[in-house]
Image (cartoon, grey):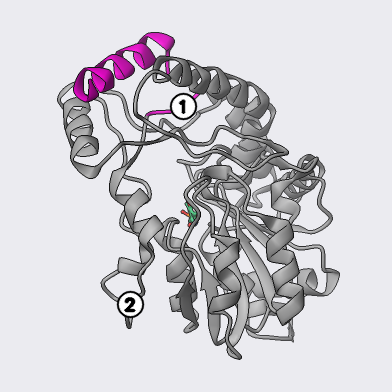
Amino acid sequence: MIQVTKTFLPPFDEYIAQLKRAWDRAWITNNGILVTELEDKLKAYLGVKNLLFCSNGTIVLQMALKVLGIEKEVITTPFSYVATANAILWEKCHPVFVDINPTDFCIDVTKIEAAITKNTQAILVTHVFGNPCDTDSIQKIASKYNVKIIYDGAHSFGTVYNNKQLLSYGDISTCSFHATKLFHTVEGGCIITKDDDLYEKLKLMRSFGHVGDQYYSLGINGKNSEFHAAMGLTNLPHLEQIIKNRTQISKRYDLLLSNSNISHPVAIDNTVYNYSYYPVIFPNEKIMLLVKNKLELNNILTRRYFYPSLNNLPYLESYSKCSTSEDIASRILCLPLYDSLTFDEVENICKIILSVIN
Ligand SMILES: *Cc1c(COP(=O)(O)O)cnc(C)c1O
């Protein structure tokens, strides 16, 4: 069976060696030395000043909205994982979906201004599959209308845009370190901001809003444990090799699928991609489903990611049309991509795909 992704697990002994540091101290959560060390290493890797390691990539979106005082309309993308829209709804804000562009599947920046009202307080958008949003245009719009920018960077770890880590953009950027993501801590995530004041507030918010007997503000439990930090510290040194392997596998796919009517998202200029996903677009939904089923018969799993387009979620108050997002969602598949996938397996996958579409 070939899964769409396979979690990278480091050599067991390496993980145990990290774990033992927490074990020996009998200190396994609440800002232990491993959490602090992981935060320092992530800050150095990403070139950012303020970063907090948190329990997952969803709570950090909620904390971002909360700390920025967002309570009304949030401009967002319909083409993302459901957590993006759910975080907005969970915080009792109102998502305003703006369609995506057909090139990189990020929000269509030419359509944002038309969606802004007097109630718009933030733009919360996803760097889809780790490809950058047009951050310059979004910044210009945000400044003009005085709204905040939150980037859901759950796919963005390691992508470099304009010579800076993509996760360093926006008022706040978040990431997920879930086991299915490029860099993982089993469960986990982080929140990043340039603003020292926001950072202090977020730090309090992550731990119930108090320090010892001093109670300051409304908080939640967004902490993560030493066991999770141990996984991060063990995985981080392997990241470069993981990205290298994924790059080669993706280029292999590119080559083998080049003479077909399959298309791919194309990142904006000045992007150094992290190879977090391998999405392909088929001419229509029918062909996509034929391919998906044929691969499944051969024990190869793919994923309709992202599907459905989030403006179609059944629990939304009302439906707003986003034709590009709905169109792409109907015919996209993510193909298997993980560091230990072999060239033989890639060849077999492509052979099956080509046998269906030709
Ligand atoms: C995975 C993901 C999340 C949620 O992260 P968790 O760590 O699973 O909570 C949020 N947004 C996007 C775009 C994701 O892919």
Q: Residues within 10 Å of mark 1 (few under 14, many from 20)?
A: many
Q: Could you tell me how far apart the alpha carbons at marks 2 and 1 are, in whole angstroms?
A: 34 Å
Residue at the extreme bottom: 118
Q: Position of residue 245 (x, y in %)?
A: 56, 19
Residue 357 on the magenta segment: yes
Residue at left offset 76%, top offset 63%: 193
Q: Position of residue 100 (x, y in %)?
A: 48, 58
Residue 316 is tagged as: 2
Residue 265 on the magenta segment: no
Which amino acid type is marked by label 2? Leu
Secondary structure beneath label 1: loop
Where are the magenta residues, as a range?
336-358
Name the quadrant containing residue 189: bottom right
Q: Position of residue 324 (x, y in %)?
A: 40, 56
Pick whichever, 295 or 113, lies toward us: 113
Which amino acid type is marked by label 1? Tyr
